[in-house]
Amino acid sequence: MPAHKIPFGQPLLDQDEIDAVTKVLGGPILAHGSVCLEFEEAFAKRVGVKHAVSVSSGTAGLHLSLFANHVGSGDEVIVPAMTHVATAHAVEYCSAKPVFVDVDPKSGNISSELIPDQITKNTKCIMVVHFLGLPCDMDKIKAESDRYKLFIVEDAALAVDALYGTQKAGSLGKLGCFSFYPIKHMTTIEGGMVTTDDHNLAESIRKRKAFGYDHSHQMRKKPGIYDVPVLGYNYRMNEVEAAVGLCQLTKLDSRLAIRKQNYSALKNALSEIDEITVFDPIQGKAQSSCYCLNAVLPQNGNLNRDDIAAELNAQGVGTSVHYPGPVPMMTYYKDKYGYKSGQFPVAEWLSAQTISLPVAPHVPNGFEIQIADTIKGAIHKVRKKN
Ligand SMILES: Cc1ncc(COP(=O)(O)O)c(C=O)c1O
């Protein structure tokens, strides 16, 4: 019998979110209101940037970041091979070409060494993804982007409060994009935020997330009257989501501290298992916000990740995979661009041989022992079978 059921992720909502949502729902304004603006201000302060623009999802934020910078047909954007498809999809939405780069085996982050080989006269932007909350090698990547006059978009979907030196993720590039999906560090149910120090860009994104209206509802002199100077989408966050986000922000410090403690406890427990490697949550100037812990199995060993994950699941431990395949190996990208297996060896290994384990605040005391013991048992079983 499983000792405890430990889901991989769980939304953490309390009475204060319910009260805040009830208050908004009882009022007349559910969209285009002041709660979103309040949330944006608080989030910008937290990240240490001048502007934050709330959006309907992390993906919408990524799309708008490229769209507002006029990325389009004929342009190329550098993207890590190991990420959620949303990062690359944002490039496709703009009719530009994602150019994939393999990742570093010690962090899962885009390899700063391999980026220069992929820069061409068509390259416009480098999208960095802070893999599972660990900031990328930003000094090198920034030097490269300055050299070729590119701009950087940070996909910080899993990196709320991650640090690079004293700076937070989301303040390291021209734009930062966050996701508030239910099991992220903080949630608004669905939702996201774009952060930047660039006033004009923030204003452009604000327009483009709401059809391209020249005046927001608050700024209209005559109700219902507006012009549309640019193309835009309907990518707004609503007031209910923003109310949840404001509550979640107040709990972020304590929840992040728990994640870090849990990561360290689980890393320690897994250190007894020779077959498993765990990324260091602090690497150089980068400090991870510890979204989850990826247990990495050997590349050429006879341990099958799926067997071990199945055993963990049977024992009540929820697992996930980050990510299920290098994005260029996903059918859409493979068919469109003709990528072949073997082109992204590190991303291929990590996606095939890692198990994502929970460290969020919902895990019970002693979870690390339960997980480590289950993995030891599973490895023993697999070895006996072979
Ligand atoms: C790295 C990364 N980028 C973007 C996204 C997409 O975020 P959303 O679901 O809010 O659109 C995710 C989702 O998990 C992600 O992991």
Image: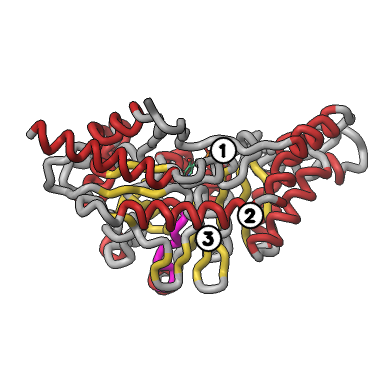
Name the quadrant containing residue 136. Answer: bottom left
CA gap between label 3 and label 2 equals: 14 Å
Q: Nearer the viewer, residue 92 or 278?
A: 278
Q: Which residue is mark 3?
A: 162
In percent of the image, x 29 and y 56: which residue is there? Answer: 271
Residue located 76% across and 32% down the image: 18
Label 1's element?
loop
* Kind of element beneath mark 2: helix
Q: Point out the tag, 1 or 2, that comes first from the N-terminus.
A: 1
The three-letter amino acid code for the residue at tag 1 is Tyr
Residue in the foreground of this view, choosing between 164 and 209: 164
Residue 14 visible? The answer is yes
Classify mark 1 as within 8 Å of ligand 1 or not, answering yes or no: yes
x, y percentage for residue 162? 53, 60
Magenta-drawn segment:
133-139
Give neighbour class at mark 2: few <14, some 14-19, many 20+ (Cα, 10 Å). Answer: few
Secondary element at tag 3: loop
Pinpoint residue 260: horizontal percent, then vertical percent: 50, 57
Q: Does residue 307 lie above or below 40 as drawn?
A: above
| Residue 96 is at least partly visible in this image | no
Q: Tell me which residue sits at (36%, 42%) in the image.
A: 371
**Which residue sits furthest left?**
386
The verdict on label 3 being within 8 Å of ligand 1 is: no
The local crowd at label 1, few if under 14, some if 14 to 19, many if 20 or more residues have their Cα within 10 Å, is some
Callout in the foreground (1, 2): 2
Q: Amino acid at mark 2?
A: Ser
**Residue at mark 1 to residue at mark 2: CA–CA distance:** 19 Å
Residue indicated by mark 2: 254
The colour scheme used here is: secondary structure
Spatial CA distance of label 1 from label 3 is 17 Å
Check the picture and name the quadrant holding the C terminus: top left
* Label of residue 181 in the image: 1
